[in-house]
Amino acid sequence: MHMTRAFLIYSALMTLVVVASNVLVQYPLPGSIAGLALGDLLTFGAFSYPFAFLVTDLTNRQFGPAIARRVVVVGFAVAVLLSIYLATPRIAIASGTAFLVGQLLDISVFNRLRRQSWWKAPLVGSLIGSLIDTALFFSLAFAPVFVALGPNEPFAIEWAPLLGLFAAEAPRWISWALGDLTVKILTGLVMLLPYGALMSVLKPMPGVAARG
């Protein structure tokens, strides 16, 4: 795949994932399971955002960290601008900050581990990036201490059973953050399947380490 064409494709995919996640994170899951309200535990954004790590890792594998960082920056810039209109300015700021830090951390970890077993770089990078991304996003987007960034969504600051499971209660956004992180960890494991399947197709360019 030609580098310029690949760069545009990866950048477009990254933008699509982040914009979709910025919109979907505002919508809690409906319904319940075994009496547990899914809306207390998860938003739809938890299922779309992990694909950003797949895009970053495939770019890093094929073209190296420098090009991967460019894809992250392009996706960040375009997604934040679009998200201001499709979501809210506060969501856009929170998403942009968390996205940039989490993805750049993923690139750094991936690059350190790329010569080890093929699964270690994408898995460890996405897990560490997800942890930081989740903490930053939900704090900036919903925590009252950051109200200067914009008003809180009323449903986010309502109190709910922690993780939808325990008797102890916490603001709903904290339960969302823990549920979101759980889904990201599980999705990070699942994303190894498409990553592994594409390894034979998207091979590293000359000069880029072969493993990872």
Image (cartoon, rainbow, N blue to C red):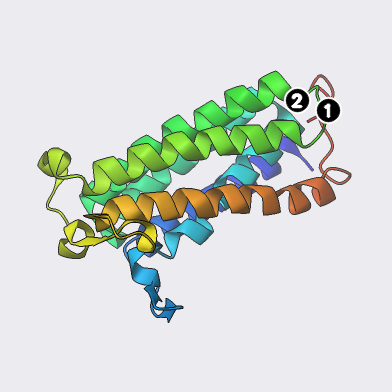
Q: Secondary structure at mark 2?
A: loop
Q: CA distance from mark 1 to mark 2?
A: 5 Å
Residue 84 showing in the rendered view: no
Quadrant into which the C terminus falls: top right
Residue 94 showing in the rendered view: yes
Instruction: Using the image, tell me which numbered label, if any, was put on residue 114.
Output: 2
In the image, residue 89 sits, relative to residue 87, either above or below, namely above
Instruction: Using the image, tell me which numbered label, if any, was put on residue 1.
Output: none
Relative to 199, 88 lies left or right: left
Residue 113: x and y in percent read 72, 23
Q: Secondary structure at mark 1?
A: loop
Residue at image point 61% right, 24% down = 109
Type of residue at label 1? Arg
Quadrant into which the N terminus falls: top right
Relative to 27, 88 lies left or right: left
The residue closer to the viewer here, 179 or 144, is 179
Residue at the front extreme, as displayed:
167
The residue closer to the viewer here, 43 or 7, is 43
**What number of labels is visible?**
2
Residue at image point 54% right, 50% down = 184
The residue closer to the viewer here, 6 or 80, is 80
Q: Are marks 1 and 2 in contact (CB under 8 Å)?
A: yes
The residue labelled by disc 1 is 211
> In the rendered image, which quarter is residue 135 located in?
top left
Residue 195: x and y in percent read 75, 47
